[in-house]
Each structure stands twice: as C-alpha cells, then as structure tokens.
Amino acid sequence: MNGDEHPDTLLILGNIGNLFQQQEKYEQASAKLTEALEILQRTLGNEHPNTVYALRNMGVLYFIQGRYEETEPYFLDGLENAMAVFGQRHPETSYLENGLGV
C-alpha cells in the first residue's frame, strides 16, 4: 500500500477530520472521517486497530452533534471489533462500552 491508501496517509486524513470536528465544521469532518474509514475497512479490514479508532471517531462526530441514532452503529461495530482486536480490558474497548452505556 502506498499513496492515498497508506496507513499513515489515512491517519492524517482522520486527523484532518478530527480537526474539522473541533472547529465545528461537521460536514467537512464527516467527509474526511468517512473517507478514511471506508478505505481502512477495504484495505486493512474491520479487525485492525486503525479501523477501530476510525469507527470510534465517526461515532464521536455524531454523538457531539446529538445524532445518537447515527452514533450507535459506529460504536457497536467499533466495540465488536475492539473486543476482537484489543480484548475486554483495553481502554479503547472500555471507551466504546461507556459510549453505549454498557
């Protein structure tokens, strides 16, 4: 993998999305975070740490906007994948459980 699909490129793309989120530019944030997530799922698969983080980032984006129904699928998928990737006691798994109220 190189160029637009390299994990480092996707990390930067996600960081740009998070920056837009912090600036409350939610449409731009969604576009960048969605692009990163879709490429990560296609290239690295769902059970990869970077994909778990990308799922969480999408859920957080919707959560801070009060779009809770849209948050839930990302947190559920993220939690399922986090359990497989990190295990029950990892901070990322706990974060996603807390986000779901588990």
Image (cartoon, rainbow, N blue to C red):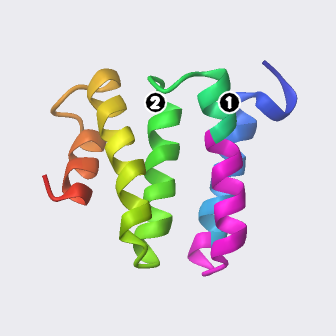
Of residue 79 and residue 19, the one placed in the foreground of this image is 79
Q: Which residue is mark 1?
A: 7
Distance from Cα at disc 2 to Cα at disc 1: 11 Å
Q: Determine whether label 2 and label 1 are within 8 Å by CB.
A: no
Q: Which mark is residue 49?
A: 2
| Amino acid type assigned to the residue bearing label 2 in the image | Pro
Residue lying at the far top of the rendered structure: 1
Q: Residue most toward the right? A: 3
Q: Secondary structure at mark 1?
A: helix
Residue 53 vs 89, above or below: the answer is: below
Which secondary structure is most common in the magenta stretch? helix
- Judged left or right of residue 72, residue 102 is left
Q: Where residue 101 sits: x, y (%)?
A: 16, 59
Q: Is residue 12 above or below residue 25?
A: above
Residue 20 position, x and y percent, is 66, 71
Quarter where residue 26 is shown: bottom right
Amino acid at pointer 1: Pro
Q: Secondary structure at mark 2?
A: helix
Spot occupied by residue 1 in the image (x, y as percentages of width and height): 78, 18
Q: What residue span does the magenta drawing correspond to?
A: 21-37
Name the residue located 40 percent from the left edge and 61 percent from the top edge: 71
Q: Is residue 31 magenta?
A: yes
User: What residue is drawn where x is 36% and y is 69%?
Assistant: 68
